[in-house]
């Protein structure tokens, strides 16, 4: 694939993920107001916290326990945000070397920007995918958060429109082309099974961390990924 083709593909994928994930911001805005936060508190969460999983965990705990549950809400959001540290380490060589980029990159290093960047192998395509996705979602997420908070009562339950599945569908579209080897499939299946099993019994954030640990172990041991033994030499010229 040529460099220009890779860059165009990175832009196209980034914009698709931006649209899908930004649409989900409507759901967050509406659910946040329904959980007891006002419009401005909801918007500040998106501006400052800006990580969808942590935000949903925060309002979920607040909605169930009120302000008295704030410490638990912060802990849950923090646990989910820990994964972004690993993303930051992986994205450090991708974001660029200028001081401004280094200063801005941590705030837009999220699931989506990391996934789009890693879907490519060409360095410039990775950088384009990272920045378009990260900055685009930041702008779109905050705009739709405000929209959802203002129109929450009119919209009703936004999950009825399938917006809660939009981000997951975008992730699946990025992940699917990489599931060509048994090792990649084993890592994905193992992590998914662990996260699904533990979600009902552990506090928000913990299933993600445990699943990530399982993925690292499966990947590190190279289970199902060992190279096939070379064919026996016959002595015949190739």
Image: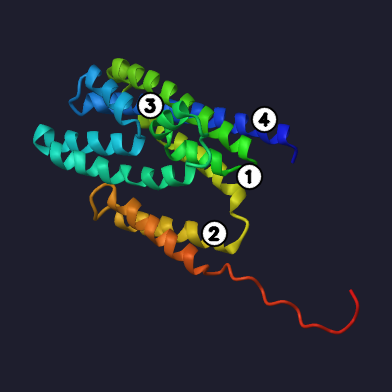
Which residue in the protein does label 4 denote? Answer: 8
CA–CA distance in space, label 2 to label 4: 28 Å
- Label 1–label 2 contact, CB within 8 A: no
Mark 4 or mark 1, which has the lower sequence index? Answer: 4
Q: Secondary structure at mark 2?
A: helix
Mark 3 or mark 4, which has the lower sequence index? Answer: 4
Residue furthest left in the image: 68
- Residue at 44% across / 22% down in the picture? 140
Which residue in the protein does label 3 denote? Answer: 25
The spot of residue 29 in percent (x, y) is: 31, 24
- Using the image as rendered, state which of residue 32 and residue 112 is in the foreground: 112
Which residue in the protein does label 2 denote? Answer: 185
Q: Secondary structure at mark 3?
A: helix
CA–CA distance in space, label 4 to label 1: 13 Å
Residue 77 lies in quadrant: top left
Residue 40 lies in quadrant: top left
């Amino acid at each position: 694939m040529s460099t220009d083709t890779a860059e165009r593909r990175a832009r196209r994928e980034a914009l698709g993920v931006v649209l899908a994930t930004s649409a989900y911001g409507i759901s967050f805005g509406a659910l946040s107001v329904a959980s007891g936060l006002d419009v401005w508190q909801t918007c500040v969460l998106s501006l400052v916290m800006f990580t969808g999983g942590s935000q949903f965990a925060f309002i979920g705990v607040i909605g169930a326990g009120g302000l008295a549950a704030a410490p638990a809400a912060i802990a849950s959001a923090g646990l989910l945000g820990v994964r972004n540290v690993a993303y930051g380490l992986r994205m450090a060589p991708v974001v660029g070397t200028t001081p401004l980029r280094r200063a801005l990159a941590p705030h837009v290093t999220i699931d989506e920007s990391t996934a789009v960047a890693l879907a490519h192998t060409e360095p410039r395509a990775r950088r384009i995918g990272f920045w378009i996705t990260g900055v685009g979602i930041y702008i779109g997420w905050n705009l739709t958060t405000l929209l959802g908070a203002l129109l929450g009562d009119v919209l009703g339950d936004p999950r009825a429109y399938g917006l809660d599945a939009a981000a997951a569908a975008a992730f699946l579209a990025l992940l699917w082309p990489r599931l060509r080897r048994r090792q990649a499939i084993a890592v994905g299946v193992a992590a998914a099974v662990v996260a699904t099993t533990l979600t009902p019994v552990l506090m928000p954030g913990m299933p993600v961390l445990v699943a990530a640990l399982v993925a690292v172990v499966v990947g590190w041991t190279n289970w199902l990924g060992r190279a096939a033994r070379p064919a026996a030499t016959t002595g015949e010229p190739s």
